[in-house]
Image (tube, helix red, strand yellow):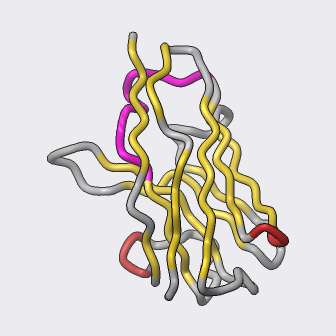
């Protein structure tokens, strides 16, 4: 059974940092792309970062560029999202997802598997 388990969320003050982890089981990354998305109630889920497991290419949304860093450990089947300089507007539930075709932009409606999400709350 394919599973993606996101963890590492929590409550942090503005300016603080968190590191999210996404552990995949039931499949190996093998050229797939793994993305991080976030969603607040009443709004559409948005993509914030994506990494290709084959060549390591990354993309970031403008809203997180320079503050968030995505990385991958293929041996551990794990993708990380290091979030620095957090802002209250980063508050959301964060999800990881996998696109087995390896598209570098991790299209929201093109992802094959989704994790259940982890809540990040940034207080002002």
Which residue is rendered at x = 64% and y = 83% of the image?
102
Please tell me how many numbered marks the rendered image carries: 0
Up the image or down, 67 lies above or below 72; here it is above
Q: Is residue 65 left or right of residue 5?
A: right
Image quadrant assignment for residue 59: bottom right
Q: Name the foreground residue: 48 vs 74.
A: 74
Up the image or down, 31 lies above or below 17; here it is below
The C terminus lies in quadrant: top left
Up the image or down, 70 lies above or below 96; here it is above
Q: Is residue 25 left or right of residue 10?
A: right
Q: Is residue 119 left or right of residue 105?
A: left
Q: Residue furthest top?
A: 124
Residue 83 image position (x, y, % from top left): 62, 35
Q: Name the foreground residue: 72 vs 9.
A: 9
Q: Residue furthest front?
A: 1
Please say whether residue 110 is one of the residues in the magenta stretch.
no
Q: Name the foreground residue: 29 vs 105.
A: 29
Image quadrant assignment for residue 58: bottom right
Span colored in magenta: 85-94
Which residue is rendered at x = 49% and y = 39% of the image?
9
Q: Residue furthest left?
A: 42
Image quadrant assignment for residue 31: bottom right
Please say whether residue 93 is one of the residues in the magenta stretch.
yes
Which residue is rendered at x = 44% and y = 66% of the image?
115
Residue 114 image position (x, y, % from top left): 43, 71
Residue 35 image position (x, y, % from top left): 56, 64
């Amino acid at each position: 059974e394919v599973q993606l388990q996101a963890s590492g969320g929590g409550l942090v003050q503005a300016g603080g940092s968190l590191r999210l982890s996404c552990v995949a089981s039931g499949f190996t990354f093998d050229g797939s792309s793994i993305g991080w998305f976030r969603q607040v109630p009443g709004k559409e889920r948005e993509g914030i970062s994506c990494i290709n497991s084959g060549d390591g290419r990354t993309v970031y949304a403008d809203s997180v560029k320079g503050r968030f860093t995505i990385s991958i450990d293929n041996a551990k089947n794990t993708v990380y999202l290091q979030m620095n300089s957090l802002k209250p507007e980063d508050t959301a539930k964060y999800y990881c997802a996998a696109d087995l075709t390896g598209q570098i932009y991790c299209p929201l409606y093109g992802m094959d598997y989704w994790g259940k999400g982890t809540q990040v709350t940034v207080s002002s």
